[in-house]
Image (tube, helix red, strand yellow):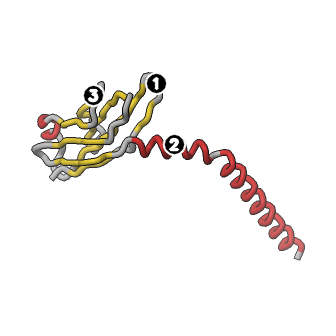
Amino acid sequence: MTWRRTWWSAVGLAVVLGAVVAVRILREEPARLRVAAAASEEILALTKDCTRARCELTWRALPGYEFRVRVLTEDLEVLQDVDLVEGSSFEVPSADLARVQPGDGLLWQVTAQDAAGRTIRSITYREDLE
């Protein structure tokens, strides 16, 4: 009987400690999580018009930001790494599209930077080439 009481006491203590840690994290993290969520939502893909012949990547522009576009194969071979002063679209050159293996797609990501150096990075998108 004693070992059962000790075991249940240990389980109870672990649950209480876990709850305390969770409450502290939730109190401290929401602001940082909101900033990260807002940043990731600011650069969203709008249209994805991609075929083996033509692929134009488009995203929602942010005023005052310069953009960098990275396009990779699924094997993580960099096809394009381009700095754009402004704009909200990039057409992948047909020579790069020809380098993508049949059945594979493209991976792409947009990074935005403002004059103060604040950087926002999109999620990595995957485009199927038909």
Q: Quadrant of residue 75?
A: top left
For label 3, the crowd category at 10 Å Cα-Cα, with few meaning under 14, some 14 to 19 and many 20 or more, is: few
Residue at left offset 56%, top offset 46%: 33
* Mark 2 vs 1: CB contact within 8 A: no
Residue at left offset 13%, top offset 46%: 52
Q: Is residue 56 above or below residue 2?
A: above
Q: Nearer the viewer, residue 77 or 55?
A: 55
User: Helix, strand or loop at disc 1?
Assistant: loop
The residue lying furthest to the left in this view is 53
For label 2, the crowd category at 10 Å Cα-Cα, with few meaning under 14, some 14 to 19 and many 20 or more, is: few
Is residue 83 shown to the viewer in this render?
A: no
Q: Which residue is mark 3?
A: 82
Q: Which residue is mark 1?
A: 117
Q: Quadrant of residue 55?
A: top left
User: Helix, strand or loop at disc 2?
Assistant: helix
Tag 3: amino acid: Val
From the top left corner, tell me how far across and down residue 69 is, in percent: 30, 33
**Residue 36: assigned label:** 2
**Residue 54: assigned label:** none
The residue lying furthest to the right in this view is 2
For label 1, the crowd category at 10 Å Cα-Cα, with few meaning under 14, some 14 to 19 and many 20 or more, is: few
CA distance for labels 2 and 1: 16 Å
Q: Is residue 87 above or below residue 4?
A: above
Q: Is residue 27 above or below residue 121?
A: below
